[in-house]
Image (cartoon, rainbow, N blue to C red):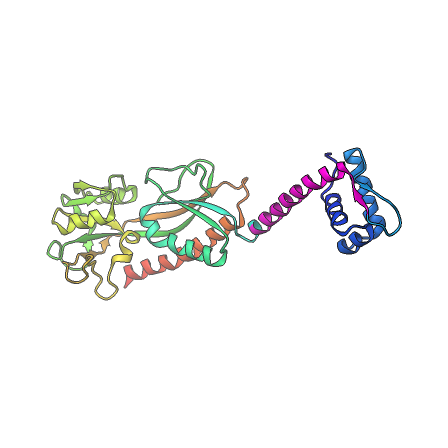
Amino acid sequence: MSETELRHLRTLVAIAEEGTFARAAGRLGYTQSSVSQHIAGLEKAVGGQVFDRPGGPKPVRITPLGAVVLEYGREVLAYADALDDAVDRFKAGNGRIHIGTLQSISNVILPTVVRRLQDEHPGCEIRLSELAPDQTELGDLDLLFHDRAIGGDAEHALLMDDPYLVVARPDELPAGKLALKALDKRGLVAWPTTQPRLEEALAEVGAKPRIVFRTPGNDTILSMVRAGLGSAVLPWLAIRHLVCPDCGDIHGSDGHEDQPLKVHELEPTPTREIYLHWPAGHVTRSPLAAHAIEIAVEVSRGLGEQAAQRRTG
C-alpha cells in the first residue's frame, strides 16, 4: 500500500462518482489511457481489483476491496488537502507564532507589531507571554523582546536605545534636566530586578541612591511616587504612553484633577538597549516570524527617533 499515490486515489474517487473511466478522465483532465494506468497502479499496490469492468458504455462497479480503498482513500485525500492548505497558509504568513516580552515593551512596541500582523495575516495565531526580566532563554519561543542580549543559541537585532528618565512629584526636584549625580542618596522606588545599564551609569558618577521600595508594577511605582515615598527612574518606553504630549507631565487616572508627576531628563543620559531575539540561523524562521521581525525593526526605528528628539528637543 506504500506505493499508492494520491493521484491514483483521486482517480479512484472520480471513477466511483462519474461511473466510467471516460467521464472520470474528462473531469480530471487526463486521457482515458492515463486513468487506466492509475487504476492499474492502484490495483497492483493493493493486490486486487478495485473495479469490475463490464466493458462498453456500461458503468463500472466498485469491488468490495475497492469500496474499502475508496472509504479510506477519501480520508487520506482530505488530510492531504488540509496539509496543502496549511502549508499554503504558512507560506502566506498565516501560521503560528509565540512571542515573549517584558512589561514596558508590551505597552509600546508589541501592540503595533501584533495589530499589523493580524491586519496583514488575518488567519495567523499569535500567542503572547509576558516574562520575568531575568528570563534569558528562548525556550519554545519564536521571538523574545528583552532589554539585554541573551545568551544561548539565539540571534538578535538591536532595536533601539531606551533612555532612563526621572519621575518625581512637582515639588521634589528643580525644573529642567537633572544631573545623574543628583540621585546620590536620594530615595527611589524601583523594580525588584537590577537595571545593569542604569546601575553602571550611576556607579560611573559615584551616585548611590537609596532604594525605599521595590515593585514590579509600573503603575504601583508611580503611585508610590505620588504618595511621597521617593522618586523613580524608569525607561522612556515604560512611561511614554502616560506622558501628556502638551505639558510633558504624567497625570493620574482622573486626568488633570490628580497631582501630576514631573518627568526629568538625566545628564548624562543612561539608556537600556532593547533587543529582539530568535532561534539561531540553523533553524529556519517561519514567514510570520520573519515579518514580525521586520515590523518590530520598523516600529522601533520610529520610536528611537522620537526618543532622540526628546533628548535634543
For the N terminus, the quadrant is: top right
Residue nearest the observer in this picture, 155 or 271 = 155
Residue nearest the observer in this picture, 250 or 43 = 43
Residue nearest the observer in this picture, 17 or 74 = 17
In this rendering, is residue 3 above or below 220?
Answer: above
Residue 104 seen in this snapshot: yes
x and y percentages locating residue 296 in the rendered image = 43, 53
Residue 182 seen in this snapshot: no
Identity of the residue drawn at 40% across and 39% down: 150
Left or right of 205? Residue 92 is: right
x and y percentages locating residue 237 in the rendered image = 31, 53
Left or right of 158? Residue 134 is: left
In this rendering, is residue 249 above or below 288?
Answer: below
Report the residue that reaches farthest toward the right. Answer: 56
In this rendering, is residue 150 above or below 113?
Answer: above
Judge whether residue 238 is colored magenta: no
Count of numbered tags: 0
For the C terminus, the quadrant is: bottom left
Identity of the residue drawn at 14% across and 45% down: 186
Region of the chain picked out in magenta, as a range: 60-89
Residue nearest the observer in this picture, 205 or 54 = 54
x and y percentages locating residue 305 in the rendered image = 36, 60
Judge whether residue 64 is colored magenta: yes
In this rendering, is residue 223 above or below 131?
Answer: below
Residue 42 placement: quadrant: top right
Left or right of 10? Residue 84 is: left
Report the magenta stretch's main SS.
Answer: helix
